[in-house]
Amino acid sequence: MRRAVIALAVVALAVVLFIGLRSAPKNNTEVENAAPSAEAVEKAFAGSPAPLAKLHGQKDRIIGGSQKALDRTIRDLRGYPVVVNLWASWCTPCRAEFPIFQTTAVDYGRRVGFLGVLIQDKRPSAERFLREFPLTYPSIDDPGRDVFDDLKAAGVPSTAFFDRQGKLAFLHQGVYRKEQDLHQDIRQYLGVS
């Protein structure tokens, strides 16, 4: 029995490593910050509904609370679809997709809630990462992998799509390589154009 558990753990680790390595950019020079200017963000978010405006007001914050904080935030956003990106500062594929989330969160920010979930990371490293790649939404700290395990994610990055009732509609495993792919999933799984 113990050997079976160890073997299963080794296989799970291999899958996580495979997804991470397969999703990694070829080199770090191809990743550039795509954060819109403060003026562009202010213009894009003008007139946002109160629950989404509250979320925008927490940009770049790292919030403690793990699964409970995520559940509370999704409950506060009931009536709006939510995109939740699982990431870590040590994750090379996360770095590759962050510019896509920077721009997409602004494109959809008046209609869709965006959240990050920081998976097993050191807070100072994550804060440095967010200074390099600022976001228009907060991230929830998940040091014990509660959110990660609850979603049954295979690795980071992963992105969960919650419908307007707060139910999980889809879990995308791996990196988004093109902005159009994330937009397509938002349209397909959340019904937002």
Image: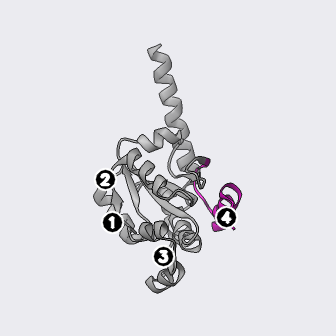
Q: Quadrant of residue 124?
A: bottom left
For the point 33% across and 63% down, the residue is 127
Q: Secondary structure at mark 2?
A: loop
User: Marks 3 and 4, Cα distance to the nearest angstrom?
Assistant: 22 Å
> Dot 1: within a 10 Å radius of its alpha carbon, few (fewer than 14), some, or many (20 or more) residues?
few
User: Marks 2 and 4, Cα distance to the nearest angstrom?
Assistant: 34 Å
Q: Front-most of 116 and 79?
A: 79
User: Marks 1 and 3, Cα distance to the nearest angstrom?
Assistant: 15 Å
Q: Front-most of 74 and 118?
A: 74
Say whether disc 1 or disc 3 marks the residue closer to the N-terminus.
3
Magenta segment boundaries in residue numbering:
169-193
- Name the residue tied to disc 2: 122
- Name the residue tied to disc 3: 35
> Dot 2: within a 10 Å radius of its alpha carbon, few (fewer than 14), some, or many (20 or more) residues?
some
State whether residue 135 appears in this view: no
User: Marks 2 and 1, Cα distance to the nearest angstrom?
Assistant: 10 Å
Q: Is residue 95 rendered to the left or right of residue 176?
A: left
Say whether disc 3 or disc 4 marks the residue closer to the N-terminus.
3
Q: Is residue 140 rendered to the left or right of residue 161?
A: left
- Name the residue tied to disc 1: 128
Q: Amino acid at mark 2?
A: Lys
Q: Amino acid at mark 4?
A: Val
Q: Position of residue 153 (x, y in %)?
A: 53, 42
